[in-house]
Image (cartoon, grey):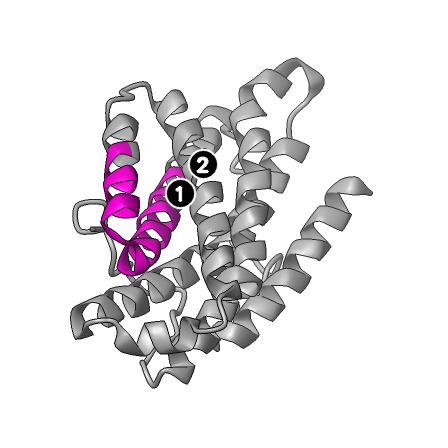
Amino acid sequence: MVKKMLVIGSLLLVSLSASAFELKVPKLGGDDKGAASGNIEADVADFVAKTAQMRDVAYASMTTIVAAYADETQLAKMKAEDEELNKKTDAKENGAAKTALIKTREAQLAELQKQKDIGEKTKALSAEKQQKVAKGLFSFGIAALSAPVLMDKGQKIVSSVSLTNVMKVLPVKDSLPMLADFVKYGSGTIGGFVKIVKGANIEVKAPAADSKPETNTKDMF
């Protein structure tokens, strides 16, 4: 019951996110593409790899947006945080640190969104920064679009194993809350920012299932 509520809640959130981004939301459960293959190790490895990719997209896109509004002091702090992140060579440690920074960036975006003059600040950004913000929003839209599909696959992987194999799927189970956050951010803070940016007459493209991210960790600042 809890698992079903998690998936249903995520689908409701992605519907709200779709409204903000004008997304074409893929149907879940209609085919076997997201189902467990029967090879637990392969399923977990594939899920972990795709989740890591979405984490990278979310981090790069959110950091890019926040950096566009940051002053020199804030920018220096963000660069230092990114340098510390890159020093973490262990994949699990790096992933955990990146997830924490994504939460920080979301909180920073939420604070920016509360500013009464955020619309005017957006209009006053340089053309280059405006494009970076638009690309950041577009790229996060891809993560918001992909998250419920990955969650559906993750739930199937977790529910397909016996108690003797439960430890093998812990990386999948542990990633589900982060994916749920991506959906929530898409319908909340990021979705709100889409409206602000569009209100400043800046185009934000609507991502589709086959869209490619337009932000990366090498060009955030």
Tell me where the magenta segment starts and ends, as one range.
52-80
Q: Residues within 10 Å of mark 1 (few under 14, many from 20)?
A: many
Closer-to-camera residue (209/76): 76
Mark 1 or 2: in front is 2
Give the left or right position of residue 69, taking residue 153 as reference. left
Label 2 belongs to which residue? Answer: 99
The local secondary structure at tag 2 comes to: helix
Q: Position of residue 211 (x, y in %)?
A: 32, 65
The local secondary structure at tag 1 comes to: helix
Q: Position of residue 202 (x, y in %)?
A: 31, 81
Give the left or right position of residue 130, taking residue 25 as reference. left
Dominant secondary structure of the residues highlighted in magenta in the image:
helix
Q: Is residue 69 visible?
A: yes
Residue sitting farthest toward the right: 1
Q: Are marks 1 and 2 in contact (CB under 8 Å)?
A: yes
Q: Residues within 10 Å of mark 2 (few under 14, many from 20)?
A: some
Question: With respect to residue 92, does 15 lie above or below?
Answer: below
Give the left or right position of residue 182, taking residue 123 as reference. right
Question: With respect to residue 22, does 43 lie above or below?
Answer: above
The residue lying at 82 percent from left, 43 percent from top is 1
Label 1 belongs to which residue? Answer: 55
The residue lying at 22 percent from left, 51 percent from top is 220
The residue lying at 43 percent from left, 40 percent from top is 51
Q: Residue 117 occupies which quadrant of the picture?
A: bottom left
